[in-house]
Amino acid sequence: MKSVTSLMELRTILERYRRDQLTVGLVPTMGALHDGHLSLIAKAKEIADIAVVSIFVNPTQFGAGEDFQAYPRDTQRDSQLAAGANTDVLFIPTAQEVYPSGFATTISVAGLTEPLEGQQRGAAHFNGVTTVVAKLLNMTSPDVLLMGQKDAQQAIVVGRMIKDLDLTVRLEVCPTVRELDGLALSSRNTYLTSDERSQAVALYKALQAAQSAVSGGEIDGVKVLTTALTAMEPFGVVPEYLSLVCPQTLNAVSVIDRPTLLAVAAVVGSTRLIDNVTLIPRS
Ligand code: AMP
């Protein structure tokens, strides 16, 4: 595995691969790698010749009062995990490399960024995400961009940006990797105390309860949401949002007569967690 920090080094290495007609998959991350990230790298190696993993804790996607300073950073551990997952190139740019002085451009996707995470975290969050992803795409010129279903809205917003800007990359959205009890893996899970870790499963329990109601034939959105909320209650976790939305438009859904995204966010202790599942109605 080659580890690089400058754009010039990255481009020099990638040019060589391109000359050899090798395809490239890009996995952008903020580090603190876990099995969710590693599953994206494995998929990159499956569908492309070269896996490029970027690690950049992107300051512009954190709001005031969010955990930018506290976000876990361990480059040595990440490098070992990335190498063990057969990463070809690990790109760890500095903030100066990504946002040189005078940087003044923002990419903003309208509409899709407004509900759910956009409502809770403000417009700047997704502007930060789309701008840094656009930069990483231009830096790497990958054939495939791999992102996780765990951050469903993020993948939908980035998909819209790719389409709207005629970017040639293909977006591959990979399934959510979970702990044995269902908690979605997240770098932020490391913040949880052991009591909070037991409470955190509430999000998955809500999604699971909704899923089993819908597989049992329930299509009434209010009833499904009530079922999901009831499943969370014993854990003492109250969602910031628990919403049924169309997986393409993110518009609210009240009748689950087609595949519908159920998205949830909740603060457990002081840790903000998100999760989602696609509900498939009984045919
Ligand atoms: P992050 O480092 O949190 O910005 O995540 C980098 C990429 O990994 C994003 O595309 C995430 O959606 C994806 N990801 C994070 N957690 C998981 C998970 N549990 N399963 C699958 N993908 C994930």
Image: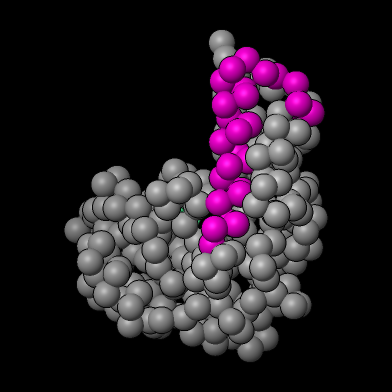
Measured from the top left, where is residue 27 in percent x and y? 41, 60
Measured from the top left, where is residue 213 in percent x and y? 62, 24
Instruction: Please tell me in which quadrant of the rendered image residue 257 appears.
Output: top right
Indicate how the structure is coloured in the image: one colour
For the record, the magenta segment spans 197-223
221 or 83: nearer the eye?
221
Instruction: Please tell me in which quadrant of the rendered image residue 58 appears.
Output: bottom right
The image shows residue 261, relative to residue 198, as above or below, that is above
158 or 244: nearer the eye?
244
Specify whether residue 203 is in view: yes
Residue plotted at (38% across, 81% down): 75
Q: Residue furthest left?
A: 20
Measured from the top left, where is residue 102 in percent x and y? 67, 86
Residue plotted at (19% across, 58% down): 20
Q: Residue furthest top?
A: 283
Measured from the top left, where is residue 126 in percent x and y? 68, 60
7 or 177: nearer the eye?
177
Residue plotted at (22% across, 66% down): 84
Residue plotted at (62% across, 15% down): 217
In reply to whether residue 212 is colored magenta, the answer given is yes
In reply to whether residue 225 is colored magenta, the answer given is no
Task: From the image, give the main secondary structure of the stretch colored magenta.
Answer: helix
Q: Is residue 245 left or right of residue 178?
A: right
Instruction: Please tell me in which quadrant of the rendered image residue 92 appears.
Output: bottom left
Specify whether residue 249 is in view: no
